[in-house]
Image (cartoon, rainbow, N blue to C red):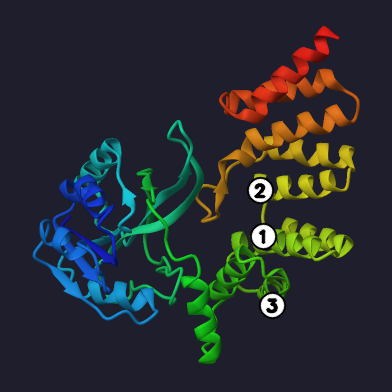
Amino acid sequence: MFLSLCMILRNEEAVLARCLDSVRKGVDEIILVDTGSRDRTKEIARAYTDQVYEFPWQDDFSAARNFGLEKASGDYWMWLDADDVLSETALFQLQRFKQQIPIETDVVMMPYGNAFDPRGRPGLLYERERILRNHPKYRFQGRVHEAVPPSGKIIRENILIEHRPQGKKDPDRNLRIYEKMLEQEAVFSPRDLYYYGRELMQHQRYLDAEKIFSGFLEASEGREEDRAEAARLRGRCLEILGEPVKAGRVLMQALLYGVPSGETCCAIGDYFMRKKQYPQAVWWFREALRAEKPLTAGAFVREECYGYLPAMNLCVCYDRMGDPETAEKYNELAGGFKPDDPAYQYNVAYFQRRHIV
């Protein structure tokens, strides 16, 4: 397999060499598209490839990425962001995979890790289309949070791509693009609505976010995983807006979309915990501990929802219900997931003081 690496860049001098050093031995061609850098990005890029192109920024990530894809000459192409990196293990896996990829393969899905803890474990894990056949039908869609809809023969490879950003990005960029789309009366896809709602919520515009999530859910389109997340987030918006009863009803809608995930169980447990309805919260946190991670469903998987978080919250619930013995057992369970966590260590000291008394 001849593999083309296609990337878009802008002011990436702090991370670009790290990314390319980690992957260049696993690809056969490197195509870099600069969208308006004002630092040393292009100088660094030219040290790795003579295929460095310029593309005027148009507030459209897909347009920039697809421009680069047109330059690819490989049988397949792979995309990365400049602040992504492959470990030595992942690079070896990629090199080996290239030698044995099934000839009928169209799309290769790989795990994408983010929010790494001090021990190097990703706090957020989800699946992305990472390597695709070099064919015009495989192109990015969406001005922001762009993606290529997977189709054809899809396979999965457990090669972890690590997202390790450095420095600060413009926190308002994505929201500006969505607001510009509104001004232009552009058509929002279900994916656009979902991510627009997330951007609004991150900017604490809870009323606007709730309306967008509501419209997304009423449209009955989009992936089940996104709809479950939208129900969870809409419920939280309503709770913040002072409508706890409606929030609870909306939150339960997340149960309509597939087998309840650890994220859904934790969200419902949190809801009851905030209402001080501890027996109900306990039931949901226990279910979170039993839930299976949907690693191949495309959902955002928060690792702590499958161990540490429900265990810690069970500790709190049982303590408040007057059962310190069970509470301490769950604190020890939480510590097994995060032994260096300050909350776990605080609780250890708390229970030790109780034993002395």
Label 1: element kind: helix
Q: Which residue is mark 3?
A: 215
Residue projecting furthest to the top: 356
Circle 2 SS class: helix
The part of the image, by quadrant, that contains residue 240 is: bottom right
Identify the element where label 3 is drawn: helix
Q: Residue at x 49, y 65 (%)?
A: 171
> Amino acid type of disc 3?
Gly
- Tag 1 residue: 228
Tally of marks: 3
Please give the residue where the numbered disc 2 appears in the rendered image: 263
Q: Earlier in the sequence, mark 2 or mark 3?
A: 3
Number of other residues with Cα within 10 Å of mark 1, as a class: few under 14, some 14 to 19, many 20 or more: many
Dot 2 amino acid type: Glu
User: Could you tell me how far apart the alpha carbons at marks 3 and 1 are, in whole angstroms?
Assistant: 14 Å
Residue 253 visible in image: no
From the viewer's perspective, is residue 303 above or below residue 5? above
Nearer to us in this view, 98 or 165: 165
The answer to whether the residue labelled 1 contacts the one labelled 2, judged by CB atoms less than 8 Å apart, is yes
User: Percent x, y for residue 309?
Assistant: 67, 37
Circles 2 and 3 in contact, beta carbons < 8 Å: no
